[in-house]
Amino acid sequence: MAITRLGNFPCIIRIVSLLSVFTGFLYLPFFLNLGLPISLGPEITQATMATEKWALFAVFGGFGLFAGSFLYNLSQSQRYKRFILGITLFSMLLLILAQLPPLFLWFYVGSADFSSTSLLGLFLHLILLVLAFWGGIATMLAFGKTNLTS
């Protein structure tokens, strides 16, 4: 099947989680300092705080998904695997929803002032969105393959 050609379910989840961590680190000011040297008012501060919250969500969510993919492989119980798959599916849905605001923002910035930076930001979030959809579908397929007989 074309959905699972990248390998098994944990492989896709690990790729999505690492890309989420990488994307989140790009938005954290202590990782990559692209801040303005002057203060432009409280609206800039609020936008910066919202961006930092989104970045922390992306980083910690990526680490959580990465840890969950390893817990899935270590588990022997089918009920525990289904529990981890349910949490993973919910996390993937949150990751998909979290990509929409930055994606629309980069689209808006790119339409107002086209540059290679806005194109890079747009494509990075678009790739993460597509991979998160792929990971969600792979999670649902893996959820369907587990049975509750044990």
Image (tube, helix red, strand yellow):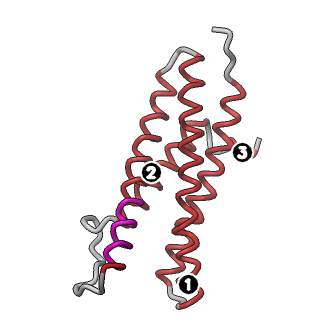
Q: Nearer the viewer, mark 1 or mark 3?
A: 1
> Which of labels 1 and 2 is toward the front?
1
* Magenta span main SS: helix
Residue that mark 2 sits on = 18
Task: Look at the image and give the residue range highlighted in magenta.
Answer: 44-54
Q: CA distance from mark 3 to mark 2?
A: 19 Å
Position in image of residue 93 (x %, y %): 59, 47
Residue 100 image-quadrant placement: bottom right
Percent position (x, y) of residue 76? 52, 15
Say which residue appears at 65% left-offset and 51% top-offset.
133
Q: Which residue lies under the disc numbered 3?
A: 3
* For marks 1 and 2 on the same chain, the one whose residue lies earlier in the sequence: 2
The tag earlier along the polypeptide, 1 or 3, is 3
In the rendered structure, find residue 74 and report the number of the disc placed on it: none
Left or right of 58, for residue 6: right
Q: Is residue 114 above or below residue 13?
A: below
Pointer 1 residue = 110
The amino acid on which the numbered mark 2 sits, given as a three-letter code, is Leu
